[in-house]
Amino acid sequence: MIIVMKDQATEKQIDEVIGWIESVGYKAHPSRGVERTIIGAVGDNRDKAILKYAESLPGVEKTMPILKPYKLASRESHEGDSVVNVGGISIGGPDFVVMAGPCSIESEEQLMESAYVVKKGGAQILRGGAYKPRTSPYSFQGMEEEGLKLLEKVRLRTSMPVVTEVVNPVDVDLVESYADMLQIGARNMRNYELLKAAGRAGAPVILKRAPGAPLRDWLLSAEYLLKYGDGRVVLCERGDSFGRGGLDLKLMERAMKATALPVIADPSHACGRREQVAAQALAAARAGADGVMIEAAADPSAALVDGRQTLGLKDFSALAKKLRALRK
Ligand code: PEP
Ligand code: MN
């Protein structure tokens, strides 16, 4: 259920409504817009029974049931677009955000040199995986906590906020202590215990769409993060196949209509080949994405993971420049 407050509702009335929602066993998720505040009340499905009573509370304009299976993720439960702040960078606002970096953190030198490529190209957020979910158990699995320490070092040296993947609920607090933003990868979109743990951590989270997942399932996974978390969720479209068949821009556009959450695209994992990354990134920007996540490194040919789709300095800078020009 959503409770729409009157334009003139006071802070005290808003607080009282929030208190009432919680007193009847629901969790209140207020969204304060420029003109009015709306409050999502999420609990079990007894919505209709309490709906009427909420309308009698001072300052309440009306109440509305949310018909979609995802409640907090649906556009109706948010006043305007949701803007997610990550270490001072706003995702979902007027600026197009570029996140970039190597697929995996492999050494201090590799990460620092790649951070230079990313910063020089004009990206705002550095990415790099310390925990890598690999198809083969024999492939490099990531540097784990040692990698997180390198990420923190580079974060301090470059002042760039960092995003990194977490694959296991028990590691959420550890990863969160080193990173500005958590990433939940395509393979883990349906790992509900991980989603709950990441939500509870209270850090901003990027949620990638699992290949083949319909919009409904993607948004229901986001709903886990929102139900347990503080609302700072960014969706990331990354294509329908691990065989790399390109972005699903139609589905991304439907997502942008269905939710107020920022939506970005990852053309690197969607394509799997660096020659195709720029065209897909530009197409996503033209379709209205709030940003892109791109694999870029100082020496793609030396990468232990995903080198084939990783851009070097020249290609990355050229793409970032085109993206800036396009979004001006
Ligand atoms: C990654 O970002 O390196 C990654 C593993 O992506 P995905 O979850 O989209 O495959
Ligand atoms: Mn990768």
Image: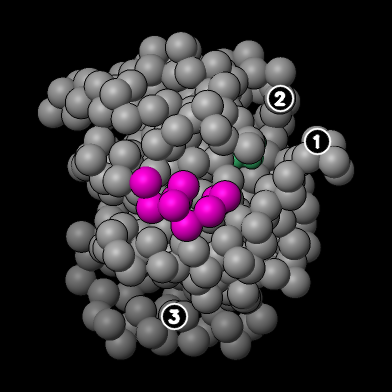
Q: Position of residue 34 (x, y in %)?
A: 20, 60
Q: Position of residue 219 (x, y in %)?
A: 61, 43
Q: Between tags 1 and 3, which lies in front?
A: 1
Instruction: Please say if 321 is above or below 279.
Output: below
Residue 194 badge: none
Q: Earlier in the sequence, mark 1 or mark 3?
A: 3
Residue 242 badge: 2
Name the secondary structure under disc 3: helix
Left/right placement of residue 133 relative to residue 208 reads right
Q: Quadrant of residue 72?
A: bottom right
Say which residue label 1 marks.
135
Say which residue label 3 marks.
17
Q: Which residues are magenta?
A: 105-113
Looking at numbered disc 2 in the image, what kind of residue is underneath it? Phe
Left/right placement of residue 189 relative to residue 98 reads right
Q: Between tags 1 and 2, which lies in front?
A: 1
